[in-house]
Image: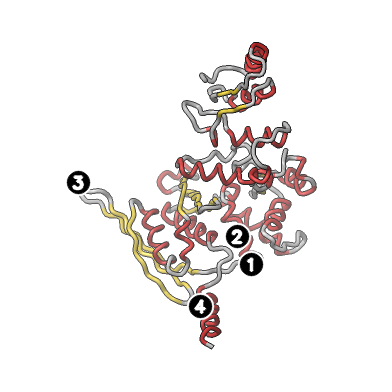
């Protein structure tokens, strides 16, 4: 329980207990103070323990408890034990993310099995090998635990990454085409400007869909204005005014928030929810600002990364500007555009509704 025991010591302790208490069911309760909670639990099982006490995502006192999201698939997929029904194992990633949401604790991206980077690949040669045989760099098929393979794209990566990403999205991108070269050149140019797509998969997908003509733009940005007021003895008040076009209709909405980004988010949602009610299920879960070119001090460019979530998915978007509000707006709009992928425009929806009403009336 104090988290300081090593795997070989656990093995000796459990083996000794099993000899002294023949037939007794033994369990193990490990903490992660030496980052060995999972290893210690597995050592105990090898030595005869048959019950593991742990928690989803390893949440617990001090450095945490044994992480069941690592223990369950290791026992089931690698050690030959049956812990849960086989059909339940693909729910592991969603369960881990759901629990992190309820606990209001961000999951580490590098969490084994269920983290968003657990099956992520970036280096060009690395990705080229993955495309030939995923076993070269993946110890299990990510689908077994409900996760998915991710190919990250940056100026350091090669054509293989972009082609793999397009393939995942079902886009037809010929590697020898002028179109593919232009997309790669554009990504490199944007990264030189400060964009970073390995942390913003959703913005990258939108970029690729635009380049291949697969993007259905559901709303058009026209303008926004910000009002930030501070009076003596009173909290700061932020108000945003947003002007958009949705389905040929011009919308002008205002929203208040506890900061400029929150106000922009509220104003944008207010404009879009009437046409796209599914946006009520998504929310911003993380917001990061990175200063680029620190030598420029307060005039420096900033990169904003926004993470958004709904009940089933998590995605990240990026914006870059010398103005932190503009960079935030760019990432915020991309997060909404990504949430609406696959949705029909209001005009099409109206036509379908009219057609259905016409059939019923007829």
Q: Residue at x 47, y 54 (%)?
A: 321
Q: Nearer the viewer, residue 11 or 267?
A: 11
Q: Earlier in the sequence, mark 1 or mark 2?
A: 2
C-alpha span from label 2 to label 4: 28 Å
Q: Position of residue 95 (x, y in %)?
A: 56, 44
C-alpha span from label 3 to label 1: 52 Å
Q: Position of residue 257 (x, y in %)?
A: 34, 54
Residue 183 left/right relative to 95: right
Q: Earlier in the sequence, mark 4 or mark 1?
A: 1
Q: Tell me whether the residue at label 4 lies in contact with that at label 3, contact meaning CB atoms closer than 8 angstroms.
A: no
C-alpha span from label 1 to label 2: 10 Å
Q: Residues within 10 Å of mark 2 (few under 14, many from 20)?
A: some
Residue 73 left/right relative to 260: right
Q: Nearer the viewer, residue 123 or 33?
A: 33
C-alpha span from label 4 to label 1: 22 Å
Q: Residues within 10 Å of mark 4 (few under 14, many from 20)?
A: few
Residue position for label 4:
350
Indicate whether 153 appears above or below 22: below
Residue 299 left/right relative to 111: left
Closer to viewer: mark 4 or mark 3: 4
């Amino acid at each position: 329980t104090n988290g300081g025991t090593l795997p070989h010591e656990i093995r000796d302790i459990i083996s000794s207990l099993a000899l002294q208490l023949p037939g007794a069911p033994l369990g193990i309760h490990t903490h992660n103070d030496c980052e060995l909670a999972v290893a210690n639990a597995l050592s105990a099982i090898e030595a005869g323990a048959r019950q593991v006490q742990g928690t989803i995502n390893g949440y617990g006192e001090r450095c945490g408890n044994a992480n069941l999201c690592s223990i369950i698939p290791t026992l089931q997929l690698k050690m030959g034990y049956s812990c849960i029904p086989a059909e339940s194992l693909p729910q592991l990633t969603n369960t881990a993310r759901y629990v992190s949401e309820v606990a209001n604790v961000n999951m580490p991206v590098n969490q084994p099995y269920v983290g968003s980077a657990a099956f992520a690949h970036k280096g060009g040669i690395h990705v080229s090998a993955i495309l030939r045989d995923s076993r070269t760099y993946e110890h299990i098929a990510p689908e077994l635990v409900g996760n998915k393979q991710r190919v990250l794209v940056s100026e350091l990566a090669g054509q293989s990454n972009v082609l793999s990403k397009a393939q995942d999205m079902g886009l037809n991108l010929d590697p020898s085409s002028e179109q593919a070269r232009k997309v790669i050149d554009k990504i490199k140019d944007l990264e030189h400007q400060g964009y970073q797509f390995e942390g913003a998969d959703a913005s990258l997908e939108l970029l690729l869909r635009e380049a291949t003509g697969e993007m259905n733009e559901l709303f058009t940005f026209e303008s926004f204005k910000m009002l930030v007021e501070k009076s003596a003895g009173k909290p700061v008040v932020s108000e945003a005014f947003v002007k958009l076009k949705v389905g040929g209709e011009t919308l002008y909405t205002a929203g208040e928030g506890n900061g400029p980004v929150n106000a922009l988010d509220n104003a944008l949602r207010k404009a879009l929810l009437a046409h796209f009610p599914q946006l009520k299920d998504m929310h911003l879960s993380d917001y990061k600002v990175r200063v680029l070119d620190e030598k420029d001090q307060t005039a420096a460019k900033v990169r904003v990364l926004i993470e958004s979530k709904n009940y089933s998915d998590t995605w990240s978007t990026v914006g870059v500007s010398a103005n932190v509000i503009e960079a935030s707006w760019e990432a915020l709009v991309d997060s909404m555009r990504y949430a609406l992928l696959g949705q029909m425009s209001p005009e099409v929806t109206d036509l379908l509704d009219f057609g259905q009403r016409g059939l019923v009336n007829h």
